[in-house]
Amino acid sequence: MKRAFLLCTTAALFMPATAYAQSTGSVEFDKEAIVVTGSRTKDVGGIQTPDATKAKAVVTQEMISRSGPGQTVLDTINIVPGVSFQNNDAYGNAGGTLTMRGFDSTRVSYTLDGIQLNDSGNYNIYSNFSIDPELIEQVNVNLGSTDVDSPTASAVGGTINQRTRTPSTTPGGLVNISLGEYDYRRFFGMFDTGEFTKWGTRAFVAASMSGYDNPFNNYGKLKRQQYNAKIYQPIGSNGDFISIAGRYNQDRNNFFGSLPLRWDANRTVGSGTGNRFPRNNDEREYDINFPCQTAVARPGLADLANTCGTEFDRRYNPSNSVNIRGNSRFSLTDALTLTVDPSYQYTKANGGGTATAREFGYDINPTGGRANCSTAAPNVNITCVGGYFGGSPYLNGVDLNGDGDVLDQVTVLAPSQTRTRRYAVVAGLAYEINPDHIVRATYTHDYSNHRQTGQVGYVKSNGEPVDVFPVNDPIAVKSGFDLQKRDRQSYAILNKFAAQYRGQFGPLRVVLGASMPYFKRDLENFCFTSSASGFVECSGQDAALDAVIAANNPYTFNPTTGAITGFSPPGHRVLKYHKFLPDLGLVYNFTNAISAFANYTKNISVPSTDNLYNAFYFPEGTAQAKPTPETTDSFDTGLRYSSSKIQAQVAGWYTKFNDRLASAYDPELDKTVYRNLGRVNKWGIDGSVAYEPMKELTLYAFGSWMRSKIQDNIQIGRFGTGVNQVTDCDNVPAGATQADIIRSCAFTKGKYESGSPKYSFGGSAVGRFSIFELGATVKRTGPRYVFDTNLPTYSGTIGSPSAVEIFPSKAPAYTLVNLDARVKLTMLKGLEKSYFQLNVYNLFDEFYVGGFNGGLNQAFSGTSYGNPNFVQIGAPRTISGTLSLAF
């Protein structure tokens, strides 16, 4: 929820249909509907509702500018009904957790000027990759559906698209200087060239730098620098144009605020797995072991690594990213229009983390129980090699700490490194049959090369990394190859064909569409896979070593029982998916003020490349090696009311979510694998109303209510003996023990999906008093289940009376209140568009459970409950001020 939502803009965030699509082609297609139908353009305090066939919402720059300096737009749209976002910090650099109508961010498409920003490997949204908010003209949200030409592989839950501003026709500039709590400092500068050629060419360039301290500990920092530019060339006088925009972003952040979810009184505050989520504000801060000293090297002795530099909060999350975006429109004839949007993206990033490296080798021969190669006498049952085995790096004869021996265990930097190159184009032809009927055909191509590695790097004596990117200068084993914790390359390819028709029949508008996406996943895994969960053993692509590993751990598969032994060798696989996706929408205008809409859309989410790599443990061609894609059937219907003083909208929706994918136990294989878990039904109501009784005051209220019902129980294990063994969760043997039942079954049938709130509601009020403006926004976010089983979190022995509840089944509801105040500098000559703005995030310093990813059930460790889930601490009260100088 954003303090931003002040001002009229906050009031409803719904804007005209001329600007709520993604690609240039979709924008033009929707814009023509407004021209043809003469749709209502009444507003309330600058608010308009889109006369669309789907439930959509738009946030404009007026509201974005009130969200606080540098804030992510995902926090800004938290006032849109159906959207729930838990921000990791008050300034937007640290990311957050998003759900839309109960779908997590991997199932929501996130785009910029129509290009896909979701990670091409795991579909995650990294909200801190947004462009500077000053440059965003609008953010449009599709709730539960997507446009037919959208380049997405996962958007069963909706789409969020940011559109960059168009350069101004006159020269000018903007400088924002911000200071705030936690030593926050940000500078943003932008310059518009105005029209500088006889053809009307215009451009802008912009840059920003920000940095601040972690509010939760004594160590972490967040630093960002970003550079943007755009050039815009109009063609003729009928709206044709070509534009090219580019962005470079560099983040150097430490992780923070993620703690285990437990409130029992016998724990102390901290970031370790044995510590609890703080109970109140007084406990939210904790100390990191910094400064510290890594283990001292001792010649001739087997040194052990200490904990210096290994804490979660000392991880760096560095990223360098570039994107180049093109948009264009060409009128080929009076009736035929071509739009083409090409793009290129490059990302280099990792998730931090350390490991304990061994200077000696690893015994790859399982006979005799993996002997310690640093001390064991050579014999026929020991085969010592270098590589990344059992989750640890082994150098097999490299002195890491310089003490002259190879007996030691040493802390090294060991993040998961990712490099992405992505090319895409969205092209379309629209033909106007007559003013009431238009058709278009589109083609979308998205080609992503995703290189995922895990090089190892040195750390300094104080635990700091020598280079946050070990890939720049990795550590090699004695035989010469670089250590890798993972080593794979994927090509995620989409070719999508779509068609759409819009017809106007008096008061009725009909929109028919369909798309046919073809997905290809070309996967190369250069490591051995040693478990059904995708655990890998990496040799650095050394052919001779690969032969030794395979000989000592031969792979076998029994097609009758599904039993697997040994390591699955490196391999190459190609998987293909396709699906016909229809889309039908209607709008009926009862009067000039009242209209109704209805829509049906089918969406698809194909398995991500990250999860498909887990399937390398199973032979190609088996069902486990190719999970079925998820699909949704989404239905929307609603009413809108628009007058000079009131705008209101209410929508009811229903989504049938088929073939939900997650890691879960497979009873046939007796293993935990990535598989389809069945169906989930979701339904709810969203609504908003904006009211402006006078031009000095705008009021806005919104709310959403949602329910979901999982249709199946899920087998998570097989425990018990004889006739009392639990092998069917719908028919549990009468003699099964409680402990065996709990370890065998996640009783999810009829339960509510985890991670998303049951309800949310709030509102904003904005007052305008001459040069002074004051706004307040409040949002109440309802409780969120931690697990799909809707059970509490426990510690202790499973099924025992001594087991203790350490956290309830739901994270409690919470309320955030944000304020902003603005003083216009109109009294100063030359600064008529300038102002000073004060933002207060989380005014009452509400202490709450922030973002977390819901899970199927609590993990187990043998006969005991496992560690609780990790969650983020909600962002604390934060005050900042911004001087905005426009010229």
Image: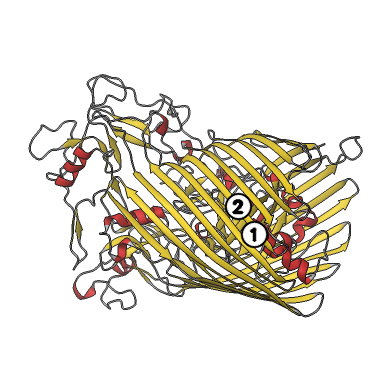
Query: Which residue is drawn at the image coordinates 16% and 39% (left, top)?
Result: 371
Query: Which residue is drawn at the image coordinates 64% and 56% (left, top)?
Result: 339
Q: Is residue 595 left or right of residue 685?
A: right
Of all residues, the one furthest to the front in this rendering is 333
Indicate the position of residue 490 as horizontal and vertical percent values.
39, 49
CB atoms of marks 1 and 2 within 8 Å:
yes
The answer to whether residue 271 is seen in the rendering is yes
Instruction: Give the alpha-carbon distance from disc 1 to disc 2, as whole Å.
Output: 9 Å
The amino acid sitting under disc 1 is Gly
Query: Which residue is drawn at the image coordinates 58% and 50% (left, top)?
Result: 342
Which residue is identified by label 2? 341
The amino acid sitting under disc 2 is Asp
Indicate the position of residue 566 as horizontal and vertical percent values.
19, 52
Query: Which residue is drawn at the image coordinates 73% and 69% (left, top)?
Result: 51
Q: Quadrant of residue 884?
A: top right
Question: In the figure, 435 relative to 806: above or below?
Answer: below
The answer to whether residue 815 is seen in the rendering is no
Question: In the figure, 538 relative to 408: above or below?
Answer: below
Question: In the rendering, which numbered label is found on residue 429?
Answer: none
Question: In the rendering, which numbered label is found on residue 25?
Answer: 1
Question: In the figure, 610 relative to 417: above or below?
Answer: below
Q: Is residue 349 left or right of residue 585?
A: left
Q: Secondary structure at mark 2?
A: strand
